[in-house]
Amino acid sequence: MTDWIAWHRQYDDQDSGLARRLRAVQAEIGAWLDETAPAPVTVVSACAGDGRDLLQVLAERDDSHRVRATLLEYDRRNVERAARSAAAAALGGIEVRCADAGLADSYSGAVPADLVMMCGVFGNVDDDAVRRLVGTLPQLCRPGATVLWTRHRRPPDLTGQVRRWFDGAGFEEVSYVAPADHVYSVGRHRFVGEPQQLTGRARWFEFNR
Ligand SMILES: C[S@@+](CC[C@H](N)C(=O)[O-])C[C@H]1O[C@@H](n2cnc3c(N)ncnc32)[C@H](O)[C@@H]1O
């Protein structure tokens, strides 16, 4: 199985596709924060890793106090790193849960959220799990919430289908970043459908590597 600490080292190379993807994700988080200011907002991040996407953005802003975020991650080493980063940046509203983000129950108390982050998830689960997961996102979203997601475009590229699944699940696309010279993509969708109750005890996905 993948060593997810080693995986994060790819971020050290600023020219890597992963580092570029990170900057694209962070730009979307920043844009979302600007749009929602000055209201208090909540964030949930599934499979958050060391949380650098969200935490680095918050550390640079003077309105981070209005953000309450729950990071779900099951590698304890990444949980500790995320918690340390949040503390170092004096971010008071961050909870890092060592939890299985594939289980509905893990989101209890953290949703519905204003921003739902699914970064580094869709490329690590079976296609059918991506379909199911997109269909369950209304359980995680407040009305008008934003979902930020990533997915590679290696053949067979699933992203066209992913975007159609979002359409069918009550979302409208706000932006989709897919550079010609790399396989990553970053999507941002707004929830315009009917909110749904969180169904306990359901398993939504498991990583396949
Ligand atoms: C591809 S990395 C993405 C990390 C981060 N979201 C990012 O984009 O930088 C996937 C992360 O998900 C974690 N993970 C895998 N399966 C998980 C699960 N079922 N629940 C919670 N975390 C999980 C791994 O430990 C790893 O840190």
Image (cartoon, rainbow, N blue to C red):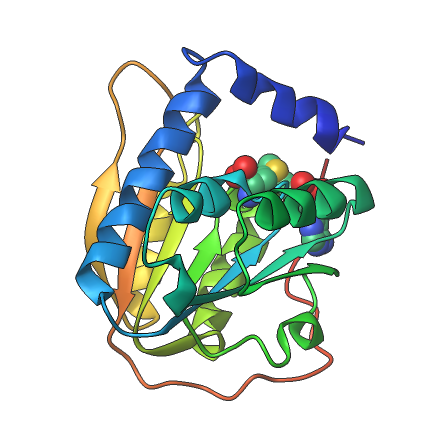
Q: Nearer the viewer, residue 85 or 7?
A: 85
Figure check: 131 above or below 80? below
Q: In this view, does 200 lie to the left or right of 175?
A: right
Examine the rendered structure and indicate whether residue 175 appears above or below residue 153: below
Q: Residue at x 57, y 75 (%)?
A: 110
Res. 88 image quadrant: top right
Q: Please state the horizontal and vertical placement of residue 118, each as a whole percent of the image.
A: 49, 52
In the image, 116 versus 136, the foreground residue is 116
Task: Return the x and y of residue 71 as percentages of the image width and height.
Answer: 60, 58
Q: Which of 24 and 42 is in front in this view?
A: 42
Q: Is 113 situated left or right of 132 in this image?
A: left
Residue 200: horizontal and vertical position, in percent? 68, 84
Residue 42 sits in quarter: bottom left
Count the numbered circles shown: 0
**Which quarter shows the C terminus?**
top right
User: Is residue 69 visible from the viewing direction of this image?
Assistant: yes
Residue ID at (38%, 68%):
66
The answer to whether 185 appears left or right of 31 in the picture is right
Vertical comparison of 182 with 107: above or below: above
- Find residue 100 and report its horizontal and vertical position in percent: 74, 60
Residue 207: tell me if it is visible.
no
For ligand 1, give the image quadrant: top right
The residue located at (48%, 78%) in the rendering is 139
Residue located at (72% from left, 32% from top): 4
Q: Quadrant of the N terminus?
A: top right
| Quarter occupied by residue 184 | top left
